[in-house]
Image (spheres, rainbow, N blue to C red):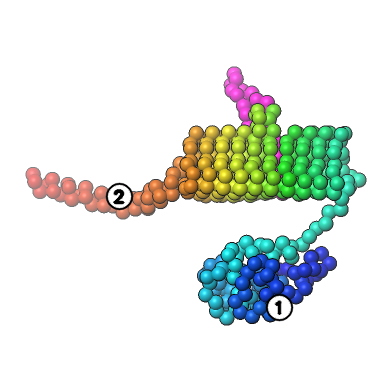
Amino acid sequence: MKCSNNTDYLPQEIYMKKTVAEIAQMINGEVDGDGSIEITGINDLQDADTGDLVFAENERWLEKAEESPASAVITNRSAVRGKKTFIRVDNPKLSFGMLMHFCAPKINYKPGVHPTAVIGQNVVIEEGVSVQPYAVIEDNARIGKGTVIGASCYVGHGVQVGEKCMFHPNSAIYAFCQIGNRVILHSGVVVGADGFGYVEQGGKRVKIPQIGIVVIEDDVEIGANTTIDRATLGKTIIGSGTKIDNLVQIAHNDRIGSNNIFCAQSGVSGSCVIGNNVIIAGQAGLADHVTVEDNVIIGAQAGVPSNKIIRGNQMVFGAPARSAKDTKRQMGAQARLPYFIDKVKELEKEIESLKASLK
C-alpha cells in the first residue's frame, strides 16, 4: 500500500515528514543507522520508492529490501544490516501494521439514519450510529453506540448489536442473533440463516425448525460471503477475537472459541467444538461432532471425520486428518510406490527364474 500525501482524506500525523527516529519511537523500535532520514510514506517492496519505509521479516525479504529504493527498513532485532537504515523491532509485521493504522484512508460515516433506510418499531439506535442508504432494521432491534450499518444491510427482528461495529454493505443478520462490540462483517455475510436440518419421512426430506440463535462475541471479523448458521436449539457461538476469512461455512450449534483463524473455503459441520488459538487452513473440512482442542493447526484441504477428537498443541493434515508426522511419512511412502512396484516386478522375475533353474 502506498500512503499518499493527499491529506484531504488521510490523517495528518504520518505526513508531517517524520524522521526515522520519530517513527521508531512510535513503534518502540531501535534505530540502526541515520535516524534523521525523512520518511514520506510506507509501501510494499514491489512499489517502494525513495522516501518510503518498508518491512522485512526474514533474510529473503531483507535482501530484496536492501536492493529496493526504499529509504529505511523495519526488521527484526537480529538482522544483519547492509546499506539501509534499520528500525529494529520484536515483530516487524506487527509494527508495520501499527504504522498502517496511521495512514490508512479513514472514511467518516455521518451519524444518523439515511432517509431511504427502513426502521421498524421499538428499535433502539444509540448515540453516534450511522445507518446508510436502504438499510433495514426490523422491530425491537438494538444498535450500540458508534456502529455503522452499511448500505442495504439487513438487521432482523430483535437483533442485539454492540458498540463500534462495522457492517459493510449487503450483510444480513437474521432475527434474534446477538453481536458483540467491535465486530466487523464484510459484504455478503449472513449470520443466523437456518441450520441444515432435515429428517427423512416417507421418501421425503422434512425440515426441522431451527429456532436457536447465533452469538458473535467481541472483536470478531468475518470475511465476505461467509455464512454462520443459527442453532437448531440453543446457540451457535463465535468466540472473541476470532477472525474468519471469505467463503467460510460455520454450521448449526458449533461452539468456536477465542482467537481462532478460519481461512477461505474451510467448513465446519454441525455441533463441533473448537477451542482457542486454532488455525483452520484453506479448504479444510470438519465433519459433524468433531472436537478440536486448543492450539491446533489443521492444514489446507485436510478432512476431519465425524466424532474425531484432535488433541491440543499439534498440527494435523491429510484426509482423513492425522498428525503431521504420520501424514508426512505416509506421503513419503506414497511417493515411492512406483519404485516399489518396479522392484516387486523385478523380484518376481528373479523368483520365476530361480524356480525354473531348480526344476
Q: Secondary structure at mark 1?
A: strand
Picture residue at 77% right of the left edge, 68% below the top: 13
**Picture residue at 8% right of the left edge, 44% below the top:** 359
Residue placed at 84% from the left, 43% from the top? 126
Per the image, the residue denoted by label 1 is: 38
Amino acid carrying mark 1 in the image: Glu
The residue to which callout 2 is attached is: 341
Q: Depth check: 200 or 247 in front?
A: 247
x and y percentages locating residue 154 in the rendered image: 79, 41
Q: Please, is residue 340 above or below residue 82 in the view?
A: above
Camera-side residue of 127 and 195: 127
Q: Is residue 319 left or right of residue 140?
A: left
State whether residue 43 is above or below residue 295. Answer: below
User: Does the magenta run of residues contain 190?
Assistant: yes
Residue positioned 17% across, 47% down in the render: 351
In the current view of this chain or complex, which residue is farthest to the right?
A: 115
Q: CA distance from mark 2 to mark 1?
A: 65 Å
| Residues in magenta, as a range | 186-210
Q: Amino acid at mark 2?
A: Ile
Crowd tier of the residue under label 1, counting other residues whose Cα lies within 10 Å: few below 14, some 14–19, many 20 or above: many
Residue 205 location (% of width, % of height): 62, 25
Nearest to the observer: residue 233 or residue 353: 233
**Above-or-below relation of 6 to 94:** below
Magenta stretch holds residue 189:
yes
Q: Could you say where residue 71 lies in the image, as x and y percent from the top left?
A: 65, 77
